[in-house]
Amino acid sequence: MRFARPAALVAALLLSACATTAPAPVWTGDHTGWTAAEADVRPIGLGIPGGAALAKGVGFAGGVQVVLEAGSPLHSLSDLKLIDGDDFVSVSDAGDLVRGRLRLDAGGRLTGVEGLRWRRLALTDGSPIADKADGDAEGLLLLADGRVAVAFERRHRLWAYELERPGAPEPLPSPETAFALNDGMEGVSTAPDGWRVAGESGGVWDCGAAGCRGVVAPPAEPVPDSEYRITGMDRDPGGDGFWVVERRFRPPVDVRGRIRRMAADGTMGPALVELSLPSTVDNFEGIAAVRHGDGVRLYILSDDNGSERQRTLLLAFDVRRAR
């Protein structure tokens, strides 16, 4: 999704441009198939007051913009999951798997990323993805066996890959529903007995090796992009539910994002974070959840679509448990 550039957005961009930009420490490993990627990192806050609303018990824990050169393989990142608390894995609309590590200060606030690297995902015959229709990855989850499962749209499917080394994927069961071309499995997450899938235009399913069952039926009329739709999901590390990030876009310039909690039965809770202009907002599509103290730390990631009008933002929020 590409946005126009209104005055409020221009102001926010100018404010962020005033912040100091520094190179992200470059990956120096030598794992087969992985290539280091350079990027700059700029600290970013919630921006101009008026567009950010945090529920009681929720705190902002830092944010960064990943500043990229044209042609960087790190553009168009669509989802994010944490491997061990700080190490993360992401995926792009071009069919690339991306690895890196979060940088936190002494107080635990997000201050940057480092060790960025990427590799091209493969088709089932082992050849690298070369076509946008094959590589439009929108979500990922970490399987119990250590592999990563990637959800693709256009040619809708869920494929499992080895995390550390390149190779052909294994197809996994996914919902047998008629997703629209560009409205597929945007939210995917581990679940107690397998994985959970949320369709961007509606519907929630729980899946496993034996197939999928419906949790929330898709609506008779698909949810349009002008209303909030799920674009990312991760399992709640402290409970039996899930955290979701949702996006809404009403042309020409009204883009919004929010975070909510989904119960095991698919029921959605109230918005805990709401972001809109003139505060910091972009095309948020990824979310990762990790235990943090007696609560949970949430990271949300925006997809810049390779556009100069959009940014790759990574924001952190801490949610305290209700007592």
Image: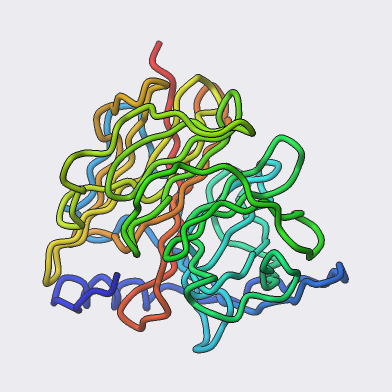
* 308 vs 235, nearest the viewer: 235
* 99 vs 53, nearest the viewer: 99
Residue 140: x percent and y percent? 56, 51
Residue 226: x percent and y percent? 15, 56
**Rendered view: 59 above or below 236:** below
Q: Quadrant of the C terminus?
A: top left
Q: Specify whether 237 is left or right of 281.
A: right
Q: Splitting the image into 4 quarters, where does residue 29 fall?
A: bottom right
Q: Quadrant of the N terminus?
A: bottom left
Residue 146: x percent and y percent? 75, 43
Q: Which residue reaches farthest bottom?
A: 70
**Rendered view: 201 above or below 165:** above
Q: Splitting the image into 4 quarters, where does residue 263 fall?
A: top left
**Rendered view: 199 above or below 25:** above
Residue 33: x percent and y percent? 80, 72
Q: Specify whether 134 is left or right of 160.
A: left
Q: Look at 20% across and 57% down and name the residue there.
A: 225
Q: Splitting the image into 4 quarters, where does residue 248 fall?
A: bottom left
**Rendered view: 70 above or below 240:** below
Q: Which residue reaches farthest top?
A: 323
How is the protein colored in the picture?
rainbow
Counting labels gives 0
Q: Specify whether 137 is left or right of 272.
A: right
